[in-house]
Amino acid sequence: MSQREAWGAALIVAAALAGWGGAMIEAVVRAAQSQHLVLYVVVPVASIGAFLVVLALLTGVGGMLLLIPALIARIRRRKLRLATCWITGAAAAAAAPYLALLVFFAILGAAMSANYVRVEALPSSPDGRGSRTRTASWRQPARIFS
Protein backbone atom coordinates (compact mmCIF):
# COMPACT_ATOMS: atom_id res chain seq x y z
CA MET A 1 0.00 0.00 0.00
CA SER A 2 1.45 3.32 -1.05
CA GLN A 3 1.39 6.49 1.00
CA ARG A 4 -1.19 7.96 -1.36
CA GLU A 5 -3.53 5.01 -0.82
CA ALA A 6 -3.06 5.21 2.95
CA TRP A 7 -3.94 8.92 3.00
CA GLY A 8 -6.94 8.30 0.75
CA ALA A 9 -8.23 5.56 3.03
CA ALA A 10 -7.62 7.72 6.12
CA LEU A 11 -9.56 10.63 4.59
CA ILE A 12 -12.47 8.36 3.70
CA VAL A 13 -12.56 7.00 7.26
CA ALA A 14 -12.45 10.58 8.61
CA ALA A 15 -15.30 11.52 6.25
CA ALA A 16 -17.37 8.60 7.49
CA LEU A 17 -16.81 9.60 11.12
CA ALA A 18 -17.62 13.26 10.44
CA GLY A 19 -20.75 12.29 8.53
CA TRP A 20 -21.84 10.02 11.37
CA GLY A 21 -21.25 12.82 13.89
CA GLY A 22 -23.23 15.28 11.77
CA ALA A 23 -26.10 12.80 11.45
CA MET A 24 -26.16 12.19 15.21
CA ILE A 25 -26.19 15.92 15.94
CA GLU A 26 -29.03 16.42 13.45
CA ALA A 27 -30.99 13.65 15.19
CA VAL A 28 -30.50 15.38 18.54
CA VAL A 29 -31.64 18.70 17.05
CA ARG A 30 -34.77 17.06 15.60
CA ALA A 31 -35.56 15.46 18.95
CA ALA A 32 -35.16 18.82 20.71
CA GLN A 33 -37.33 20.59 18.14
CA SER A 34 -40.12 18.10 18.74
CA GLN A 35 -40.17 19.38 22.33
CA HIS A 36 -39.96 23.01 21.14
CA LEU A 37 -36.36 23.51 22.33
CA VAL A 38 -33.46 25.27 20.62
CA LEU A 39 -30.05 23.82 21.53
CA TYR A 40 -27.02 26.11 21.79
CA VAL A 41 -23.32 25.59 22.38
CA VAL A 42 -22.16 29.17 21.65
CA VAL A 43 -23.79 28.72 18.21
CA PRO A 44 -26.88 26.67 17.39
CA VAL A 45 -26.12 22.96 17.44
CA ALA A 46 -27.69 22.57 13.98
CA SER A 47 -24.88 24.74 12.58
CA ILE A 48 -22.28 22.47 14.16
CA GLY A 49 -23.96 19.44 12.57
CA ALA A 50 -24.02 21.16 9.18
CA PHE A 51 -20.33 22.03 9.52
CA LEU A 52 -19.56 18.36 10.17
CA VAL A 53 -21.51 17.43 7.03
CA VAL A 54 -19.46 19.95 4.99
CA LEU A 55 -16.29 18.47 6.49
CA ALA A 56 -17.45 14.94 5.64
CA LEU A 57 -18.26 15.87 2.03
CA LEU A 58 -14.94 17.60 1.43
CA THR A 59 -12.75 14.96 3.10
CA GLY A 60 -14.64 12.20 1.30
CA VAL A 61 -13.99 13.83 -2.07
CA GLY A 62 -10.33 14.36 -1.16
CA GLY A 63 -9.98 10.73 -0.11
CA MET A 64 -11.54 9.48 -3.32
CA LEU A 65 -9.31 11.76 -5.40
CA LEU A 66 -6.30 10.15 -3.75
CA LEU A 67 -7.53 6.57 -3.66
CA ILE A 68 -9.32 5.95 -6.98
CA PRO A 69 -6.41 6.74 -9.38
CA ALA A 70 -4.05 4.61 -7.30
CA LEU A 71 -6.47 1.69 -7.37
CA ILE A 72 -7.16 2.03 -11.10
CA ALA A 73 -3.41 2.00 -11.77
CA ARG A 74 -3.24 -1.49 -10.21
CA ILE A 75 -5.42 -2.98 -12.98
CA ARG A 76 -3.03 -4.89 -15.27
CA ARG A 77 -5.13 -5.30 -18.44
CA ARG A 78 -4.92 -2.15 -20.55
CA LYS A 79 -8.45 -2.30 -22.03
CA LEU A 80 -10.06 -2.97 -18.68
CA ARG A 81 -8.06 -0.12 -17.11
CA LEU A 82 -9.14 2.30 -19.86
CA ALA A 83 -12.78 1.24 -19.55
CA THR A 84 -12.61 1.71 -15.79
CA CYS A 85 -11.08 5.17 -16.25
CA TRP A 86 -13.81 6.26 -18.68
CA ILE A 87 -16.62 4.89 -16.50
CA THR A 88 -15.16 6.53 -13.39
CA GLY A 89 -14.73 9.84 -15.24
CA ALA A 90 -18.32 9.73 -16.51
CA ALA A 91 -19.62 8.95 -13.02
CA ALA A 92 -17.59 11.82 -11.55
CA ALA A 93 -18.91 14.21 -14.21
CA ALA A 94 -22.49 13.13 -13.47
CA ALA A 95 -22.01 13.47 -9.70
CA ALA A 96 -20.24 16.85 -9.74
CA PRO A 97 -23.36 19.09 -9.97
CA TYR A 98 -25.13 17.09 -7.26
CA LEU A 99 -22.09 17.28 -4.99
CA ALA A 100 -21.79 21.02 -5.62
CA LEU A 101 -25.41 21.53 -4.54
CA LEU A 102 -24.90 19.38 -1.44
CA VAL A 103 -21.82 21.36 -0.42
CA PHE A 104 -23.57 24.68 -1.15
CA PHE A 105 -26.61 23.92 1.02
CA ALA A 106 -24.49 22.39 3.77
CA ILE A 107 -22.37 25.56 3.87
CA LEU A 108 -25.56 27.63 4.06
CA GLY A 109 -26.70 25.52 7.01
CA ALA A 110 -23.33 25.91 8.74
CA ALA A 111 -23.26 29.68 8.19
CA MET A 112 -26.75 30.13 9.65
CA SER A 113 -25.35 30.60 13.14
CA ALA A 114 -27.21 33.64 14.41
CA ASN A 115 -30.63 35.11 14.97
CA TYR A 116 -32.85 32.42 16.22
CA VAL A 117 -35.64 34.70 17.39
CA ARG A 118 -38.77 33.10 18.77
CA VAL A 119 -41.87 35.11 19.63
CA GLU A 120 -44.57 33.58 21.78
CA ALA A 121 -48.00 35.11 22.22
CA LEU A 122 -49.33 34.51 25.69
CA PRO A 123 -53.04 34.48 26.52
CA SER A 124 -54.55 37.86 27.19
CA SER A 125 -54.44 39.13 30.71
CA PRO A 126 -57.58 38.95 32.88
CA ASP A 127 -57.97 42.73 32.97
CA GLY A 128 -58.33 42.86 29.17
CA ARG A 129 -55.08 44.67 28.35
CA GLY A 130 -54.33 42.33 25.46
CA SER A 131 -51.58 39.80 25.05
CA ARG A 132 -47.98 39.99 26.20
CA THR A 133 -45.09 38.73 24.08
CA ARG A 134 -41.80 37.13 25.04
CA THR A 135 -38.79 36.97 22.79
CA ALA A 136 -35.61 34.95 22.96
CA SER A 137 -32.59 35.94 20.94
CA TRP A 138 -29.49 33.89 20.18
CA ARG A 139 -27.84 35.35 23.27
CA GLN A 140 -30.68 34.34 25.60
CA PRO A 141 -32.30 31.11 24.46
CA ALA A 142 -35.60 30.24 26.06
CA ARG A 143 -38.03 27.35 25.94
CA ILE A 144 -40.88 27.81 23.56
CA PHE A 145 -44.40 27.13 24.88
CA SER A 146 -43.17 26.85 28.46
Image (cartoon, grey):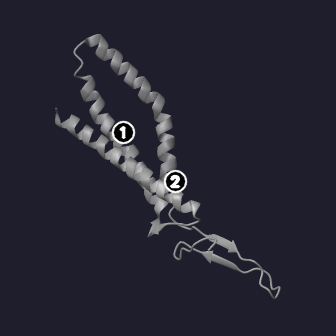
Along the line of sight, the residue nearer the viewer: 40 or 24: 24
Relative side of 106 to 121, left or right: left
Q: Position of residue 132 (x, y in %)?
A: 72, 81
- Quarter location, residue 58: top left
The CA distance from mark 1 to mark 2 is 19 Å
Q: Are marks 1 and 2 in contact (CB under 8 Å)?
A: no
Q: Residue flagged by tag 1: what amino acid is it?
A: Val
Along the line of sight, the residue nearer the viewer: 31 or 60: 31
User: Split into 4 quadrants, where in the image is the N terminus?
Assistant: top left
Q: Which mark is residue 61?
A: 1
- Quarter location, residue 82: top left
Secondary structure of the residue carrying numbered label 2: helix
Q: Is residue 62 above or below residue 85?
A: below
Q: Residue flagged by tag 2: what amino acid is it?
A: Leu
1 or 2: tag closer to the N-terminus:
1
Q: Is residue 36 above or below residue 68?
A: below
Residue appearing at x 59%, y 65% in the figure:
36
- Quarter location, residue 128: bottom right
Residue appearing at x 33%, y 40% in the figure:
62
User: Split into 4 quadrants, where in the image is the C terminus?
Assistant: bottom right
Relative side of 69 to 90, left or right: left
Relative side of 74 to 64, left or right: left
Relative side of 122 to 78, left or right: right
Q: Which mark is residue 108?
A: 2
